[in-house]
Image (tube, coloured by chain):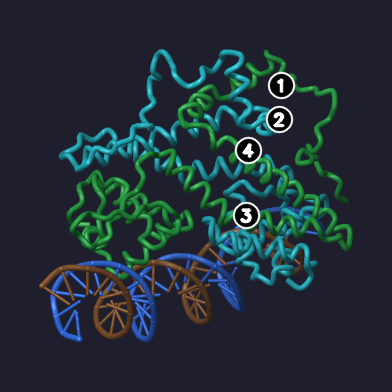
Chain colours: A cyan, B green, C brown, D blue
Amino acid sequence: MTTLTPLVHAFVSHFGEMGSHWGINRTVGQIYALIFVAPAPIHADEIAERLSFSRGNVSMGLKELQAWRLVKLRHVPGDRREYFEAPSDAWEVFRTLAEERRRREIEPTLSMLRNALLETPSNEADRVAQERMRGMHDLIDLLTTWFDDVQRLDPHTLAKLMKMGAKVQRLLEATGALKPRNDPKPDPKPDFLRSEADHG
Amino acid sequence: MTTLTPLVHAFVSHFGEMGSHWGINRTVGQIYALIFVAPAPIHADEIAERLSFSRGNVSMGLKELQAWRLVKLRHVPGDRREYFEAPSDAWEVFRTLAEERRRREIEPTLSMLRNALLETPSNEADRVAQERMRGMHDLIDLLTTWFDDVQRLDPHTLAKLMKMGAKVQRLLEATGALKPRNDPKPDPKPDFLRSEADHG
DNA sequence: CGGAGGTTTCAGTGTTTACTGAAACTTCAG
DNA sequence: CTGAAGTTTCAGTAAACACTGAAACCTCCG
């Protein structure tokens, strides 16, 4: 921590704090932050020294960051050590993060929900529970499918679309691609909108 | 845990596990799951009994869930106890979650980044660090602004738009609202695309 | 093949966080 | 005002997790 400028120190500390809110621990957050702002790839020793962590700790942290695909390995000619670098394009980082979180958190949940939906409810309470789970499943499914789809657009186009924001709706209504709210034929699966106030 | 059907038990356990990956702890995850699938509002004692948690623990958990606005207080006529209910519309849950996470995680980060961007870099390393931070800031800003905007659409329209996914791009290009990739005048702020390979 | 330079693993320890059970507090009916 | 029914707080303990330092382990050069 000694050789960090105030600017970098603030950034690194913040990522440490945030790490705990996310699934990663403080150490890993700080290591990532340091690599992210570094002007050139750095190696484990440098990280250990600059953050005052043990070498073992840094090694573990780097392993985890590699598992998250948030850092890339680099080799410097004439140097056997492994250098680490973080993609500096924020979009790329965002996509990686989204993909990994999805794989680790969303997919297991979806799979649990799918299993639950295959069961035959044994009583009324189970029936209601299953309804709720279906609502959750359908929304997650919709969101992830959409994300898959949209993720393939090039960042520039995507940025433009996002800047348009809700204007897209009006534009599409104008062209007739999107009807203004009362659809003639109902959608095949608009289940997640059910109001579900049928208890008691 | 004794009075739970296998269906509900699986759901509750899964949320317990996931709780640790998210910022909330196992207990809180389980309590939420139980309330979410319950056919009617339930009170603290019932939760404590069904999950075999101490009453104090349940009380804390409920407090946290209320802070997250994930459960609502209900009162049953002729009963002084407080009953809890979770909104069963998955969209609403998603929005609440997104808003709270934003308030707790994104906003502090944005504010830290804004401060960092106001500093005058004291050397070359700081300059580069600041560039990276700017990229991150701009992306987060874009994403949250977009989310604000889109969130106000009614769920039905939103669902339709999402089902269209990337098709929106082609549609808009056809109407001329979106140019197919080589823009005549550059955007005011496309900074987050800079490739930033100028070290060494 | 020896050993310099580097990485990974691991037992042990310190720190944080979760959880319990009991006591303190609140509210309300009579 | 009293006490029954309920909720919240809290000190203490148990469990989980992070981190160190040292040893074991690789890998490549000479």
**Residue pointed to by mark 3:** B107
Three-letter code, disc 3 = Glu
**N-term mark: 4 or 1:** 4
* Whole-percent x, y for residue C1 in the image: 68, 62
Q: Secondary structure at mark 1?
A: loop
In the picture, residue A29 is in which quadrant? bottom right
Question: Is residue A141 positioned above or below C26 on the image?
Answer: above
Q: Residue at left 70%, top 68%?
A: A51
**Disc 3 to disc 2, C-alpha distance:** 23 Å
- Chain identity of mark 2: A
| Residue drawn at the location 65% of the way across and 27% of the way down | A153
Chain that bears disc 4: B
Nearer-the-camera pick, B21 or B190: B190
Say which residue label 1 marks. B178
Alpha carbons under labels 4 and 1: distance apart: 17 Å
Query: Mark 2 and 1 residues: CB-CB less than 8 Å, in contact?
Result: yes
Neighbours of disc 1 within 10 Å: few (<14), some (14-19), many (20+): some
Q: Please say if C7 is above or below B7.
A: below
Q: Is residue B81 above or below residue A3?
A: above
Q: Secondary structure at mark 2?
A: helix
Question: Horizontal and vertical percent for residue A104?
Answer: 48, 45
Location of mark 4 (residue): B146
Q: What's under tag 4, amino acid-wise?
A: Trp
What's the amino acid at mark 2?
Lys
Answer yes or no: is residue A68 visible: yes
Q: Judging from the image, what secondary structure is the residue with disc 3 in?
A: helix
